[in-house]
Each structure stands twice: as structure tokens, then as C-alpha cells.
Amino acid sequence: MVTCLVCNKGFKRLGGHVIDAHKMTSKQYYDKFLKLEGEGCCLMCGKETKFSASYKRAKRKGYDRFCSISCSTKLQWKTDESFRKIVTDIFKQSVHEYWKNPENIKKARIRGKECIVLMYNRLNENDLNGLMNKKEERLLKLLPDDFEFVGNFKKVIAFMSPDFISEDRKKIVELYGDYWHKDESIEKTQHRIDIFKSFGYDTLIIWEKELKSSDVKRKIEEFLK
């Protein structure tokens, strides 16, 4: 039996009673009487999570702990060393199998950096430059020789892979594509910059359209001072 916290009567199931007698949805009832402090926010990113009215979809009634499987995996990757080892071993095995097929390398070049298979490139050191797209190649030519292209996940900082990095200068240069980043908020971009800063790197954002301007060289020079 479950006791209704509105009328203190016992019921086998509360859902129907709460709706019929008190005109409240299961979520409204839960929010008013059962919700814990901080519940309903993703433990990884802080976004609002989904509410489960029954135990069928979730392990517990109430709000999910994460807003997505991605956030759940990220936190587990961050805190569980055994999980990281298992995933890494599986990943490396699949990588070797994937790159045995020359057609997959061809597809990766055609689709450019946004193709997820570029993650595999960290195990294929002889083909690093080949997977840069033309705009990235153009930007690399404008940067000093100590900058390296790492946008193929050769360098990962807090789950993020910057495009170009100089370890000597502790500088990062990001190339934002006009299509891929057109809807990105200022807050998200600043968050990325702040994360890199917490690891000791200063970051410069260059937009694809800026590559056509002569001012891009001056912008880079100012950043490197």
C-alpha cells in the first residue's frame, strides 16, 4: 500500500487517484512532495532531465540522473578507470579492423573532419595531414611552424579535440566552420575557451569566412604576442 500525501489514504497505486481526486499529474505530485534538492538536473552538464512516472522506463521513479546517454557515458569515462580500459580496448580493436579497408580511408577524406571516423586517425600516424580539409590546410599555413594539427583527436582536452595547438606557446587556434557552428551559442563557445584555459591554454577562434579576409593574419599576430 502507498499512502497519498495529500489525503493520507492508502492505495495500491497512486497514479489514478492523484489525477482523479486531486487533479494533479504524477509529475506535479512528485515535484510537490517527493522531489529531492538538486534532482532533475543532469549530473554531467546541468541540463534538465526527463521525469519517469513509473519504474518501467527507469530504475527508479522520479527524474533521470542524466539528460542523455552521452552525458552518462562521459561521467563514467571520467570517474571509472576500469570502464575507460574496457572501452579503449574495444575501440582499438575496431580501429584496426576499420582501417584495413582502403575505402574507409577514402570516405574519411571526402567527408572531412566532421566524419567521426577521424577518431581512428590517432592510430594511423602516417596519414595525419591527409585528413585535414582544405580550409584547415589553409589556416595551418598561416600559423608558425610550432603549431600542430590535432583536430583528428590526436590531442584531447577534457573530451574536446582542438584544431591546432602549440605546446611551446600554450596556445590553441580553433577553426569554426560557417555551417557546422552557425547555431552555436556564445555561451557554448566561451565554455570551450574557459575549459582550455583551465588547462593552461589561450584560445583563438577563427571563423571560416575570416580566411578570405586579409585581417586574419593580423588577428593571428595579435593573439601570438
Image (cartoon, rainbow, N blue to C red):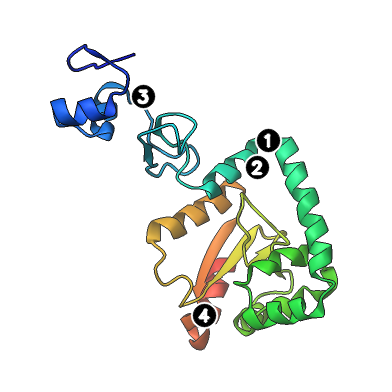
N-term-proximal mark, 2 vs 3? 3
In percent of width and height, residue 79 lies at: 64, 35
Q: CA distance from mark 4 to mark 3?
A: 51 Å
- Graded by Cα atoms within 10 Å as few (under 14), some (14 to 19) or many (20 or more), the crowding at tag 3 reads few
Bin the neighbour count of mark 1 within 10 Å (Cα to Cα): few under 14, some 14-19, many 20 and up.
few
Q: Is residue 1 above or below residue 112?
A: above
Residue found at x 75% / y 76%: 104
- Cβ–Cβ under 8 Å for marks 2 and 1: yes
Q: Quadrant of the C terminus?
A: bottom right
Q: Which kind of residue does numbered mark 4 sit on?
A: Val
Q: CA distance from mark 2 to mark 1?
A: 6 Å
**Residue 77 - label:** 2
Q: Is residue 203 above or below residue 194?
A: below
Tell me the CA gap for discs 1 and 3: 26 Å
Label 4 vs label 1, nearer the camera: 1
According to the picture, the residue beneath numbered tag 3 turns out to be 36
Q: Which residue is mark 1?
A: 80
Q: Position of residue 1 (x, y in %)?
A: 34, 13
Image coords of residue 224 (percent x, y): 59, 67
Which sits in the foreground, 143 or 41? 41
Task: Give the Cα separation between the discs numbered 2 and 3.
Answer: 26 Å
Callout 1: SS:
loop
Of the residues under marks 4 and 1, which one precedes in the sequence?
Answer: 1
Visible residue check, residue 59: yes
* In the image: residue 58, left or right of residue 114: left
Check residue 216 in the rendering and tell me which mark sits there, or answer none: 4
Q: Quadrant of residue 72?
A: top right
Foreground label between 4 and 3: 3
Name which residue type carries label 3.
Answer: Leu
Q: How far from the left and from the top, in percent, is residue 174?
A: 56, 68
